Amino acid sequence: MAQLQKQQNFCFVLLLFVALGIAYAREAFEVSFQQNYKIAWGKHHIFFLQHGREVQLSIDKTSGAGFRSKLEYASGFFQMRIKIPNKDCRGVVTAFYLTSTAYKHLGAKHDEIDFEFLGNNGQPHTLQTNVFTNDEGGREQRHSLWFDPTIIFHTYGVLWNQHQIVFYVDEIPIRVFKNYSNVGVSFPSQQMHVTASIWNGEPWASNGKRIDWKQAPFTAQFQGFNIHGCQTQNYNKHACYSPYLWWNDKKHWKLNSQQQRAYEDVRKKHLLYDYCSDRGELHKECQIN
Ligand SMILES: *[C@@H]1O[C@H](CO)[C@@H](O)[C@H](O)[C@H]1NC(C)=O
């Protein structure tokens, strides 16, 4: 009996060490903000925590704030852990997105891939996603989240390769935007910065209501500044389509059956709004499925 107890204790201690090891490995493996990102605007509304491994953005009446990647990318799997303001923050938008900026002066059309939290208004927390390609957006989808995104960090991610763009919440694919260029739908092709911000979205994000500035500042926290992406600074963007980059591998060309089930389940239970049901006639990709 005592022997068994000892063994159990030993197993417990071993497990504890493994768990701690994983936690430390993750910590050690994570780069600090400065490695990949820089402040874009509102520097007095940005605070660094945990030795630069966490960043807090805040907004008050005077300013919001934003940061973006130092480099641009043309494919990858981009993720960030985010905790949004825990107050009634109608009108305050917390955003994590990829956006093209370069070559506008040469007539390049804008591409963008967005996550936007539209504040809360006593409503379930609403996450909006959107895709702009070739200057054309208007592809909003809105989901109600199945958790409270103000309490702990959750991971929001975008897979972007030549075949599809997938929006993930934690491990779950909530949206897929396929490359239908074969039928004339354009697909984001420009190099993009990875960006995050908190900004004043009234009136569109607040149904015309005003931000309650008495509750300011509103703060959002961000973690996870590693970037798994193909940067375009030293390479031609076509190198970013290489099959040797893991996110371009065939297994990421479409959802696997398990992901497909999770995706369909989320659509059934949590999709609040889909541009295809609203303005589908304006978008060819809506007429395909
Ligand atoms: C979209 O798919 C086509 C093949 O159907 C490919 O040639 C093209 O590079 C893809 N576009 C992007 C931006 O990845």
Image: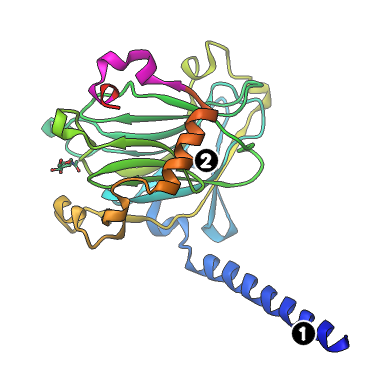
Callout in the foreground (1, 2) = 1
Depth check, front residue: 132 or 174: 174
x and y percent of residue 61 in the render? 56, 25
In the rendered structure, the answer to whether residue 104 lies left or right of residue 66 reads: left
x and y percent of residue 208 in the render? 53, 10
x and y percent of residue 146 in the render? 60, 35
Q: Which of the two discs, 1 and 2, labels the residue nearer the N terminus?
A: 1
Disc 1 residue lies near ligand 1 with CB under 8 A: no
Q: Quadrant of residue 36?
A: bottom left
Say which residue label 1 marks. 7
Q: Which residues are magenta?
A: 273-285
Q: Magenta stretch: dominant SS?
A: helix
Compared to residue 267, the image places residue 123 above or below, namely above
* Whether residue 41 can be seen here: no
Disc 2: CA contacts within 10 A as few (<14), some (14-19) or many (>=20): few
State the residue at coordinates (19%, 53%). Answer: 241
Residue extending furthest toward the bottom = 3
| Amino acid under disc 1 | Gln
Q: Per the image, is 175 magenta?
A: no
Q: Quadrant of the C terminus?
A: top left
Secondary structure under badge 1? helix
Secondary structure under badge 2? helix
Q: Quadrant of residue 14?
A: bottom right
Task: Tell me the distance, in whole angstroms, between the alpha carbons under discs 1 and 2.
Answer: 55 Å
Depth check, front residue: 232 or 241: 241
Q: Tag on residue 44?
A: 2
Q: Tag on residue 21?
A: none
The quarter of the image that holds ligand 1 is: top left
In the rendered structure, the answer to whether residue 180 lies left or right of residue 15 reads: left
Compared to residue 203, the image places residue 255 above or below, namely below
